[in-house]
Amino acid sequence: MRHLIPLAQKFGVTDDLAREAIVSCASLAEIAVLKQAVQANDALLDAWLSETEATGPSFSNEYIAFSAMRMAADLA
């Protein structure tokens, strides 16, 4: 899922208001790429984000960023 890293870096913001602002400022093309990428990799994201790390108590920065990226795609 390395190809998703640029999207996670841009949209994987944990603060809800900041993430909303990023999504609202993104171009329609950026939103289309985000939604398509998340949708195309949904099963992989589900598998990774529901593994043992999902139970916490601590989460890696990558786990958090990719989870927030999915929230951004849902918001868009």
Image (tube, rainbow, N blue to C red):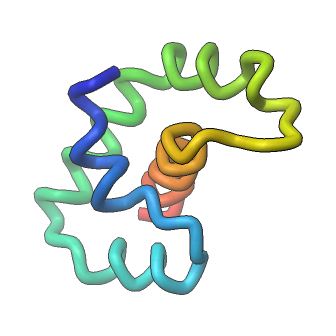
> Which residue is rendered at x = 40% and y = 22% of the image?
41
Q: Quadrant of residue 14?
A: bottom right
Q: Is residue 8 above or below residue 43?
A: below
Question: Residue 32: x and y, percent?
Answer: 22, 50
Q: Is residue 13 above or below residue 47?
A: below
Question: Residue 22: x and y, percent?
Answer: 34, 77
Quarter of the image where the N terminus is located: top left
The residue closer to the viewer here, 36 or 47, is 47
* 4 sits left or right of 20 in the view: left
> Which residue is rendered at x = 29% and y = 60% of the image?
10
> Which residue is rendered at x = 79% and y = 18% of the image?
52
The residue closer to the viewer here, 53 or 50, is 53
Quarter of the image where the C terminus is located: bottom left
> Which residue is rendered at x = 22% and y = 27% of the image?
3
Question: Residue 48: x and y, percent?
Answer: 60, 19
Question: Residue 33: x and y, percent?
Answer: 20, 45
The residue closer to the viewer here, 41 or 7, is 7
* 22 sits left or right of 14 in the view: left
Q: How many marks?
A: 0
Q: Is residue 15 above or below residue 31?
A: below
Q: Is residue 63 above or below residue 43?
A: below
